[in-house]
Image: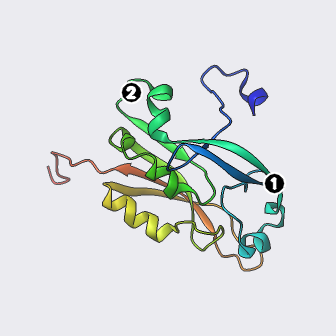
Amino acid sequence: MQAHLAGDPRWEARRLALGREIGTATIHVSRNAYSSSLLPILPAHLAAEPEAEYVSHESVPVSTVDALLNDVAGSSQRVFLKLDTQGFERAVLEGSKVSMEKICGLQMELSLQPLYVGETLFSDMLRLLEESGYRLHLLHPGIHDPATGRTLQVDATFFAHMISTHSIDS
């Protein structure tokens, strides 16, 4: 990853996971790399994507968005947060409580059916984010089960709800 980003000064890679608290965790590394997660994978995921099989485990430092935000975003008052944490999104958001007032938009990959042990599914995350003042703006299909055609994950984009002083009729 570091070599990939070396030519672009706008990007910085850090070897860490995000979660609800600072510490260390074990990440399960998938053969396909992009299915790697802090959570154990479920058989439904492996049936749809055999390359998601875990092939190793590594210890990684864990930080929180609250601990990192000022460091990476400085005094910015508006931040767009992109999460791709393979089922660990809720824990990351729980580590973002202080930062949520700065986070005007979120994009995250959410499962429609359980793919990782303990993950928060799309419907529950939608409710939690709406209760926190975010509204769903965009869905993009993610992985699907090739045997059934069923969509298993979607990329969802949310923005903080802004009350407009202008109505559509004015």
Residue 87, image x, y percentages = 60, 60
Q: Residues within 10 Å of mark 1 (few under 14, many from 20)?
A: some
Instruction: Look at mark 1 in the image and give the residue it sits on.
Output: 32
Q: Residues under labels 1 and 2: Cα distance?
A: 35 Å
Q: Residues within 10 Å of mark 2 (few under 14, many from 20)?
A: few
Q: Quick one: 43 or 57, which is closer to the camera?
A: 57
Residue 6, image x, y percentages = 73, 22
Residue in the picture at 17% in, 51% down: 167
Residue type indicated by callout 2: Ser
Q: Quick one: 156 or 39, which is closer to the camera?
A: 39
The answer to whether residue 70 is above or below residue 66 is above
The answer to whether residue 157 is above or below residue 112 is above
Residue type indicated by callout 1: Asn
Instruction: Look at mark 2 in the image and give the residue it sits on.
Output: 76
Q: Quick one: 107 or 36, which is closer to the camera?
A: 36
Residue 21, image x, y percentages = 51, 47
Residue in the picture at 47% in, 35% down: 67
Residue 107 falls left or right of residue 101? right
Which of disc 2 and disc 1 is earlier in sequence? Answer: 1
Q: Tags 1 and 2 in contact by the CB under 8 Å rule? A: no
Residue 1, image x, y percentages = 75, 34
